[in-house]
Image (cartoon, helix red, strand yellow):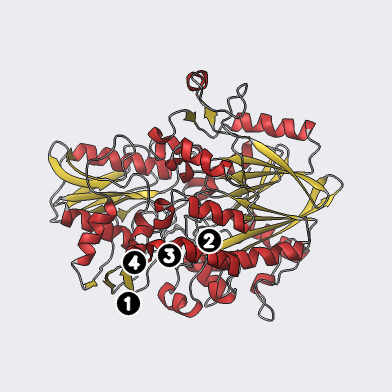
């Protein structure tokens, strides 16, 4: 079972006292990045970079609700409560990295985060500290999508950058939205090894010639790999996002089925332990933090889960007890903002100790690696004019991350209402997309950072009030279902032109009520409304790409003036440390 909040705090204090968790990250008398090496093998982990080759601003959420067992458990703690929980001093680089607090002012002070040239410098330093042949670099997926140059080069810009960075192993989610053929083409032309135990080729498709790694098991890709580092054999098992054909269009990958497949994972881990003479088993996961915590409860034999998908920057692992012992569960944030560093100590052929840090990648504190910067410059050069087009200025901070709405999402929804002449706009609750500071110019690159994907088409159609409620209820259940294995990640649908009330603690069909148009009138179940949206996962929508719609809206403004985003009225969450209403 997973630890309670009180038990976790006790564990964190004991681990720090015992030297398992380093306080070097918070030391004021040395560089944030001079962390040394205390283990025999170093596992470095990045995830959910979402194509951001250059440094960005990225605001952490002020709403990240945890319900039931997750109430008060990381990552569902925000703001000042998060700083208290982890003992992070306010008004420090770490406080800025891990929280939304005073974001505009702190971003001006500490600068941008991430960027592959700065990331490359840090990775090289971390490798050198660990010693030659003693480290692995893992990428948890969502690396090829999220920026204009990813879309315009069909993922080639990121695949080349990953090779330059020296990524050893990866798994996937949004990578599949380029389609099976392109995904395999990029992987086959790379030195990065791809693993996924939970992607299975349909039997009929395999009979018709669809490619499979193993026709007996049906695995589309190698389920795991073994690397020898520091004289130890490290097994890395891949766990791709289990709901890819539901959250994204299945038409891109019609031959594949996914799933959590925890029973198959247990069998695989048991087989690896019994027959491969390994010293450690790592799960490279794109499940999301809460799913990984439950997975660690029901699957034993995994030493650590290096997780992604939910974009949670976890300063310390959760330690989960299970039938076979304990499993560390981490999540590595997003947008190139962090590098997870797990140093493993061994006694014989077993892990005997560890030290973990999630290092913020501050571009101002790390020199740009020349080779990587040259690659980035070459990638951007053909598109410089298009990327640099100034659409307008903004008088407010634009951000996306948060369970219910963000100002960037509000811009997109308002644009659809205005340009497409709709009463209501609905936009997916994506968690990718950098932030833009108040007073800054908004460029086409900034807009594409919120919209660059392979199914961007918009729609306008008549929907009944009942249909709108069903949509909201369905997404709310994906986000707040009491069983993490039924959660698909992401956030609530963003809206414009309407409001509603939500009780996240309720069950399917009972969370949403009091839906109203912006004029205050109730949305009636049997009445029809003109609704716009984009990024449909079924059939292809007929409208213009969302970036064209939003660009038209922004070009008509000298300065974008933003109020508070349209967030629902929340009930049932009083006292929850995962919500701070601003």
Cα gap from disc 3 to disc 4, whole angstroms: 9 Å
* Marked residue nearer the N-terminal end (4 or 1): 4
Name the spot of residue 564 as percent of width and height, x first.
28, 66
Which mark's residue is nearer the viewer, 3 or 2? Answer: 3
Instruction: Please report the residue visible at 55 percent of the width from the left and 63 percent of the height from the top.
Output: 116
Cα gap from disc 3 to disc 2, whole angstroms: 21 Å
Which mark's residue is nearer the viewer, 4 or 2? Answer: 4
Disc 4 target residue: 385
Disc 2 target residue: 336
For residue 231, above or below residue 17 = above
**Dot 3 crowding, Cα within 10 Å, few <14, some 14–19, many 20+:** few
Contact (CB < 8 A) between labels 4 and 2? no
Disc 1 target residue: 439
Instruction: Please report the residue visible at 36 percent of the width from the left and 37 percent of the height from the top.
Output: 508
Q: Left or right of 213: which side holds 131?
A: right
Name the spot of residue 551 as percent of width and height, x first.
25, 60
Disc 3 target residue: 381
Residue nearest the observer in this picture, 505 or 157: 157
Contact (CB < 8 A) between labels 4 and 1? no
**Dot 2 crowding, Cα within 10 Å, few <14, some 14–19, many 20+:** many
Cα gap from disc 2 to disc 1, whole angstroms: 24 Å
Res. 243 in view: no
Instruction: Please report the residue visible at 15 percent of the width from the left and 48 percent of the height from the top.
Output: 522
Q: Quadrant of the N terminus?
A: top right
Res. 275 in view: yes
């Amino acid at each position: 079972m997973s630890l309670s909040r009180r038990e976790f705090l006790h564990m964190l204090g004991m681990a720090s006292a015992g030297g398992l968790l380093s306080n070097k990250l918070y030391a004021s008398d040395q560089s944030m990045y001079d962390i040394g090496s205390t283990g025999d093998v170093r596992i470095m982990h990045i995830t959910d970079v979402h194509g951001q080759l250059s440094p960005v601003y990225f605001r952490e959420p002020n709403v990240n609700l945890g319900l039931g067992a997750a109430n008060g458990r990381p990552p569902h703690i925000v703001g000042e409560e998060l700083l208290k929980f982890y003992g992070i001093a306010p008004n420090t680089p770490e406080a800025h990295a891990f929280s939304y607090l005073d974001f505009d002012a702190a971003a001006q002070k500490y600068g941008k985060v991430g960027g592959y040239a700065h990331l490359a410098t840090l990775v090289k330093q971390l490798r050198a500290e660990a010693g030659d042949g003693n480290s692995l670099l893992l990428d948890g997926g969502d690396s090829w999508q999220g920026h204009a140059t990813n879309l315009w080069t069909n993922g080639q810009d990121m695949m080349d950058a990953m090779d330059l960075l020296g990524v050893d192993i990866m798994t996937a989610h949004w990578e599949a939205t380029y389609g099976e053929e392109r995904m395999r083409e990029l992987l086959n032309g790379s030195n990065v090894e791809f693993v996924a135990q939970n992607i299975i080729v349909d039997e009929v498709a395999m009979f018709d010639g669809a490619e499979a790694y193993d026709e007996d098991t049906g695995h589309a890709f190698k389920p795991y790999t073994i690397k020898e580092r520091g004289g130890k054999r490290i097994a890395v098992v891949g766990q791709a996002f289990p709901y890819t054909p539901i959250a994204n269009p299945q038409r891109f990958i019609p031959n594949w089925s996914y799933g959590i497949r925890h029973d198959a994972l247990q069998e695989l881990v048991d087989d690896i332990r019994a027959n491969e003479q390994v010293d450690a088993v790592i799960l490279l996961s794109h499940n999301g933090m809460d799913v990984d915590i439950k997975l660690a409860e029901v699957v034993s034999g995994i030493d650590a889960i290096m997780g992604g998908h939910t974009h949670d920057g976890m300063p310390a692992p959760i330690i989960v007890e299970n039938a076979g012992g304990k499993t560390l569960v981490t999540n590595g944030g997003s947008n190139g903002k962090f590098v997870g560093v797990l140093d493993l100590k061994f006694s014989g052929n077993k892990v005997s100790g560890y030290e973990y840090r999630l290092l913020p990648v501050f571009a101002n504190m790390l020199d740009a690696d020349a080779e990587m910067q040259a690659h980035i410059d070459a990638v951007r050069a053909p598109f410089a004019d298009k990327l640099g087009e100034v659409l307008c200025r903004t008088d407010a901070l634009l951000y996306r991350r948060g369970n219910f709405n963000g100002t960037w999402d509000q811009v997109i929804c308002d644009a659809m209402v205005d340009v497409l002449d709709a009463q209501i706009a609905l936009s997916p609750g994506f968690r990718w997309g950098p932030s833009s500071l108040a007073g800054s110019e908004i460029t086409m690159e900034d807009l594409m950072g919120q919209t660059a994907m392979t199914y961007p088409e918009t729609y306008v159609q008549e929907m009944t009030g009942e249909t709108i409620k069903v949509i909201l209820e369905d997404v709310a259940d994906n986000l707040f279902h009491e069983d993490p294995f039924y959660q698909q990640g992401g956030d609530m649908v963003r809206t414009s032109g309407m409001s509603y009330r939500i009780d996240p603690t309720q069950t399917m069909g009972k969370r949403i009520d009091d839906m109203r148009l912006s004029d205050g009138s109730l949305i009636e179940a049997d009445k029809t409304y003109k609704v716009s949206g984009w990024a449909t996962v079924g059939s292809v929508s007929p409208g213009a790409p969302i970036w064209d719609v939003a660009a038209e809206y922004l070009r008509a403004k000298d300065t974008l003036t933003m109020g508070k985003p349209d967030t629902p009225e929340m009930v049932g969450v009083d006292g929850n440390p995962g919500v701070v209403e601003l």
